[in-house]
Amino acid sequence: MNILETERLLFRKHILADKEAFCAMEMDADVRRFVGGYPRTREDAEKRFEGAIKPSDNSLGMWAAILKDEQQYIGRCGIYPHFDAVGNPIEGEASLGLYIATPYWGRGFATEAGKGFTDLGFNKLGLNRIVTMVQAGNNASVRVLEKLGFHLVLTEEGIRTFYHFVLEKAG
């Protein structure tokens, strides 16, 4: 079952056939540079995949991103619950995640996925606000968020610097 379809992509639950491509992304230093800072070991990547393959009860989650023409796994994208400081989900809000494998960078897939998931969140799930964070230096992701209409609301300084972005439902 597909959760979402865009012009070139479809998004569905992860399946066992996705395992190699999923693990390759988790072990790719370029993909991981701005999400954790280091590539995962194969063992850790497989553990992450076990979590990704678990069934979800609703549309909130990170989904396998499949390039329709090639039926190829190219990453994982989605919107998932946004939590407050004590770990409670914030009603009417979600977080956006876009992870695309390096061979598919620079082709507009993250922007296409982001547009699809923000539309899903606002128009089908009734969300009022979608948030996301980007590590400083990840200029390509910042550009994607700007194209999608997100606004920078906070810069969090620490061991690493993170930019916090927000997109509010129009109207």
Image (cartoon, rainbow, N blue to C red):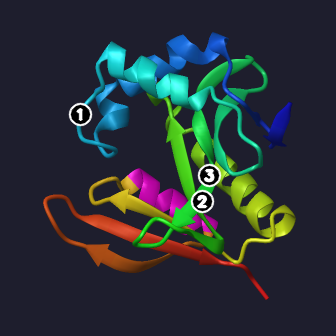
Tell whether 84 sits left or right of 58.
left
Q: Amino acid at mark 1?
A: Tyr
- Check disc 1 and report the residue beneath it: 38
Residue 108 appears in view: no
Label 2 Cα crowd, 10 Å radius (few <14 / some 14-19 / many 20+):
some
**Residue at the image position 30 percent from the left and 64 percent from the top:** 162
On residue 81, which mark appears? 2
Q: Position of residue 149 (x, y in %)?
A: 60, 72
Residue 126 appears in view: yes
CA separation in Å, label 2 and label 1: 25 Å
Mark 2 and mark 1 lie on one chain; the one further toward the N terminus is 1
Q: Position of residue 122 (x, y in %)?
A: 77, 69
CA separation in Å, label 3 and label 1: 24 Å
Q: Nearer the viewer, mark 2 or mark 1?
A: 2
Tell whether 4 sits left or right of 82.
right
Mark 3 and mark 1 lie on one chain; the one further toward the N terminus is 1
Q: Secondary structure at mark 1?
A: loop
Q: Relative to residue 61, is residue 39 depicted above or below? A: above
Q: Are marks 2 and 1 in contact (CB under 8 Å)?
A: no
**Residue at the image position 54 percent from the left and 50 percent from the top:** 97
User: Which quadrant would residue 93 be assigned to in this image?
Assistant: bottom right
Q: Which residues are magenta?
A: 140-148
Q: Amino acid at mark 2?
A: Pro
Q: Secondary structure at mark 2?
A: strand
Q: Quadrant of the N terminus?
A: top right
Q: Amino acid at mark 3?
A: Thr
